[in-house]
Image (cartoon, rainbow, N blue to C red):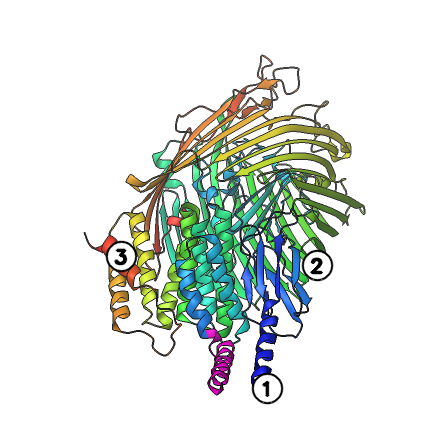
């Protein structure tokens, strides 16, 4: 009997811990992969919405906003309409700004801003090249200035460099150098203090190197 | 045992709490479900996302009353207080935010070009890439419907209005003498580079009550905000050189551009019809400074300084042995400061001041005109946003214009001047009945110190979305403008010219394609009439006229791969009884049919953007002095085919070339006649033609930037 009582108490205690202390970790652990893996608008919006709720409920966490914004960038692949794509990118920028009120001048958030600009170019390269490619480069360079060891900033810069060089029809524009730098940073170590700090990018970098720099 | 029972009770109690839930369905006003709405309990992680049917379900715990929030991009947030201890079944209708993205836009009369708004028919870049436009704003706008090809001026003649009836505004402030000077019967260019602007609205009628002193058309230009990138640009062109630098700081930026233009080398290579003594030469400086004064405040300064000069010879018509030296010189200074700030969430303020000083010196033999116009414009506009459905704008402005001219001939000289103060106030309300139906109602009152009269200009417009891609729009308004400076010099209190516009427009915009059709009718009154322009005692201010027509526009960036084209057609039927007309006649600057086909294509294999523009205008009238009938002469139809190419040599270097009138068609704009008949009573005539059949331009544009990836590419 006593055992049963103890078990019940144990379960309740676990539930309480769950409800308070572990809630953030659990929500992040579930929704970050959900955001990256979502294959349709419904499940992606579901993950984004949950990340936004976590961000709104936690006053001092910028990470939920980082992934929510990333989710909105992913949303542009779910629609054909340029107007809709812009709407999602506008929203991504809004969320990045929310993150920056918690952590100003952050290299990861700045890289993500550059990512948004880069995606704007892809919607209408002919008329947007000027404005947004410059802005994207600016953001990636700024992100690297804020943290030279941010592998994602180097990877994204490489993609922008390659795209521009391809358009001009000459070389890689320094992209392979950026990718190599990103790869070595990815491999040399990861952030251990913060389990939810952005860590994506190694596979994409390898893939980019394979496609753009080898062969 | 008792303790255990208590626990069981407690747990089952918790279980019971967990059983309650909020479920429901979220839709738009139309009843269509919304997918992806974030529905949650405020301050918690608890929530759900609506599915395809708009349904959601949130289990709830706890007993304190809670706030349920529903948020979705493009819609107003929805909040409701709920008791948690019972199940809720809700039907929530989210109210659409009326934003730039979804709201119907009143398009009657106006063509908007912008980099920001996605729903415009044109982009700012189009100005630069249009063949035949020579990177001149009016040049590119002349390929749009509603405009008339008047090749000998290069100005915007809109819907039966003269060139002076189109007024230019930069950041809301008026610009006087916006065209660079040119030799008689040769086209002038706008003084303002298209690169300066992030957006423009070219209104061919029915524009906002904020703008006055424009009888037919308003060209409203918005200058760029703070530059985000530093760069240096150098250009070497067949007509001159320029150097520009932009420096960007955290909260401010400075841009400067210095240009030197000299057509002497070009005229040596390409034969001109005009015997030049000194080909046009111009020094031009543009400087802009922008300062972010707060999160929402922006202060802008802009100034343009230029000086130009040209001399040529003119053979007397019918008597080519007599040659008159002609001199054209101009000194120009324009300064504009504007400031905008959001005072609170609902109140915005915009204010500005502009200053223009322009001196034209024209001489023909012993005759000369020295004309100095100085303008000042101060303006304050308040903007009140009651909600996303009601917006109120009101303000006041003072337009001061002083003119001093000295007319000199062998008999002596004559001095004229005027000093005009126009004070005005306006109010305009924009209301949205829904995102599909909008109204704009405005009133403008102007008081002119010279005439002592006040004038009321009511203006109304409305737009209704007839479908996802289509809309209809209508506009009506009354517009006024002081007569030309020539008339004002002679009769200071000349009555203002008045026009009344009626416009109906249909627009369809699909992905990459758009179509517009517009019909209009305009009535003119109080136009100045005279027997002799130089006999002001005979001036009468009772001239009348009308203009009506149809404008069509089709643009397609999608059907043909990498190719963008547009087609414009305008039909214009207009008559005026003004100036020295013996009755109502179609003026000589009018052609009934105008057509343009503009094509652009990026050819990847040669890394070049090429453009081709064909323009057609039906015949124009001219006054044949050898005929008894007034304006009985007819010019041949006008044709022009222009070509341009921009080659991206590298990230930093672009080579641009263009040829206007590739086919070398001999266009005739009209005829001029000798002032006296010859011995047989015949007036000798001379056609007015372009100074050369073709115009060829070649330039190399180099960009130096810290970041090597920025190029002028964009500038194409």
Calculate the distance from the C-alpha at mark 1 to the C-alpha at mark 2: 68 Å
Q: Nearer the viewer, mark 3 or mark 2?
A: 3
Please state the chain letter of the residue tagged with numbered disc 3 in the rendered image: A
**Residue B201 in sight in this render:** yes
Mark 3 to mark 2: distance in Å? Answer: 53 Å
Q: In this picture, is B525 found above or below B43?
A: above
Boundaries of the magenta span: A1-24
Residue that carries the numbered disc 3 in the rendered image: A207
Is B287 in the magenta? no
Q: Which mark is residue B222?
A: none
Q: Which residue is mark 2?
A: B384
Q: Find residue A181 and report its horizontal and vertical position in percent.
A: 26, 66
Letter of the chain that mark 1 sits on in the rendering: B
| Mark 2 chain | B
The image position of residue B635, as x and y in percent, is 54, 20
Label 1's element?
Answer: helix
The N terminus of chain B, quarter of image: bottom right
Query: What residue is shown with label 1?
Result: B2
Q: Are marks 3 and 1 in contact (CB under 8 Å)?
A: no
Establish whether labels 1 and 2 are both on one chain: yes
- Taking the image as drawn, is residue B652 in sight? no
Tag 3, which secondary structure? helix
């Amino acid at each position: 009997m006593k055992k049963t009582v103890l078990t019940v108490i144990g379960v309740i205690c676990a539930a309480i811990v769950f409800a308070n202390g572990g809630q953030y970790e659990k929500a992040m652990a579930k929704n970050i992969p959900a955001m990256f893996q979502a294959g349709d608008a419904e499940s992606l919006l579901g993950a984004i919405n949950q990340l936004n709720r976590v961000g709104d409920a936690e006053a001092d966490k910028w990470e939920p906003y980082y992934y929510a914004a990333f989710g909105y960038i992913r949303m542009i692949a779910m629609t054909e309409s340029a107007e809709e794509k812009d709407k999602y990118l506008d929203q991504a920028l809004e969320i990045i700004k929310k993150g920056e009120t918690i952590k100003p001048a952050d290299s990861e958030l700045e890289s993500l801003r550059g990512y948004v600009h880069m995606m704007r170019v892809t919607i209408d390269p002919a008329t947007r090249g000027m404005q947004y490619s410059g802005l994207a480069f600016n953001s990636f360079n700024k992100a690297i200035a804020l943290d030279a060891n941010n592998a994602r900033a180097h990877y994204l810069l490489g993609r922008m460099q390659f795209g521009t060089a391809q358009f001009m029809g000459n070389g890689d524009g320094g992209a392979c150098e950026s990718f190599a730098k990103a790869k070595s940073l990815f491999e040399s170590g990861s952030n251990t203090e913060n389990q939810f700090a952005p860590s994506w990018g190694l596979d994409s970098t390898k893939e980019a190197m394979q496609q753009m720099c080898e062969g | 045992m008792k303790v255990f029972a208590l626990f069981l009770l407690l747990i089952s109690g918790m279980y019971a709490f967990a059983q309650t839930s909020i479920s429901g369905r979220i839709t738009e006003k139309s009843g269509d479900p919304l997918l992806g709405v974030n529905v949650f309990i405020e301050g918690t992680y608890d929530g759900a996302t609506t599915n395809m049917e708009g349904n959601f379900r949130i289990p709830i715990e706890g007993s304190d009353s809670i706030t349920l929030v529903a948020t979705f991009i493009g819609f107003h947030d929805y909040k409701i207080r709920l008791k948690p201890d019972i199940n809720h079944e809700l039907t929530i209708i989210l109210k659409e935010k009326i934003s730039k993205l979804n709201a119907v836009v009143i398009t009657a009369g106006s063509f908007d070009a912008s980099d920001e708004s996605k729903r415009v028919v044109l982009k700012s870049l189009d100005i630069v890439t249009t063949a035949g436009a020579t990177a001149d704003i009016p040049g590119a706008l002349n390929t749009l419907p509603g405009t008339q090809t008047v090749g000998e001026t290069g100005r915007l003649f809109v819907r039966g209005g003269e060139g002076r009836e189109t007024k230019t505004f930069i950041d809301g402030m008026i610009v006087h003498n916006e065209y660079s000077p040119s030799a008689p019967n040769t086209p002038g260019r706008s003084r303002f580079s298209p690169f300066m602007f992030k957006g423009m609205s070219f209104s061919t009628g029915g524009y906002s009550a904020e703008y006055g002193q424009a009888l037919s058309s308003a060209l409203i230009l918005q200058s760029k905000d703070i530059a985000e990138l530093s760069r240096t640009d150098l250009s070497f062109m067949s007509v001159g050189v320029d150097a520009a630098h932009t420096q960007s700081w955290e909260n401010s930026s400075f841009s400067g551009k210095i240009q030197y233009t000299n057509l002497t080398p070009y005229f040596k290579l390409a034969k001109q019809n005009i015997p030049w003594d000194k080909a046009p030469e111009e020094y031009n400086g543009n400087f802009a400074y922008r300062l972010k004064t707060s999160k929402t405040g922006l202060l802008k300064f802009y100034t343009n300084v230029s000086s130009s000069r040209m001399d040529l010879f003119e053979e007397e018509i019918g008597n080519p042995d007599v040659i008159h030296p002609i001199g054209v010189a101009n000194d120009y200074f324009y300064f504009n400061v504007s400031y905008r700030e959001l005072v609170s969430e609902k109140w915005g303020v915009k204010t500005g001041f502009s200053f223009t000083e322009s001196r034209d010196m024209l001489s023909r033999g012993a005759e000369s005109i020295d004309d100095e116009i100085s303008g000042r414009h101060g303006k304050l506009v308040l903007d009140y946003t009651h909600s996303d459905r009601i917006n109120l704008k009101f303000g006041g402005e003072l337009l001061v214009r002083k003119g001093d001219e000295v007319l000199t001939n062998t008999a002596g000289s004559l001095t004229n001047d005027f000093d005009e103060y126009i004070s005005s106030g306006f109010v305009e309300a924009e209301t949205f009945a829904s995102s599909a139906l909008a109204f704009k109602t405005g009133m403008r009152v102007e008081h002119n110190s010279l005439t002592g009269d006040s004038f009321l200009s009511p203006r109304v417009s409305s737009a209704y979305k007839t479908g996802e891609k289509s809309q209809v729009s209508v506009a009506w308004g009354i517009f006024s403008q002081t007569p030309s400076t020539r008339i004002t010099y002679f009769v200071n209190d000349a009555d203002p010219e008045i026009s009344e516009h009626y416009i109906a427009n249909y627009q369809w915009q699909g992905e990459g394609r758009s179509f517009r059709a517009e019909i209009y009718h305009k009535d003119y009154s109080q136009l100045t009439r005279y027997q002799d322009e130089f006999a002001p005692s005979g001036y009468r201010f009772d001239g009348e006229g009308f203009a009506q027509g149809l404008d069509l526009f089709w643009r397609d960036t999608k059907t043909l791969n990498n190719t963008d084209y547009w087609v414009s057609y305008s039909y214009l039927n207009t008559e005026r009884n003004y100036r020295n007309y013996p009755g109502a006649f179609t003026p000589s600057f009018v052609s009934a049919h105008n057509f343009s086909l503009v094509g652009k294509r990026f050819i990847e294999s040669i890394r070049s953007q090429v453009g081709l523009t064909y323009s057609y205008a039906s015949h124009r009238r001219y006054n044949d002095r050898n005929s008894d009938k007034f304006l009985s002469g007819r010019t041949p139809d006008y044709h022009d085919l222009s070509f341009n190419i921009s080659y991206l040599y590298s990230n930093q270097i672009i080579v641009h070339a263009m040829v206007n009138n590739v086919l070398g068609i001999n266009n005739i704009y009209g005829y001029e006649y000798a002032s006296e008949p010859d011995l047989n009573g015949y007036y000798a005539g001379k056609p007015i033609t372009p100074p050369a059949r073709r115009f060829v331009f070649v330039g190399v544009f180099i960009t130096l930037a810290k970041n090597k990836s920025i190029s002028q590419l964009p500038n194409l």
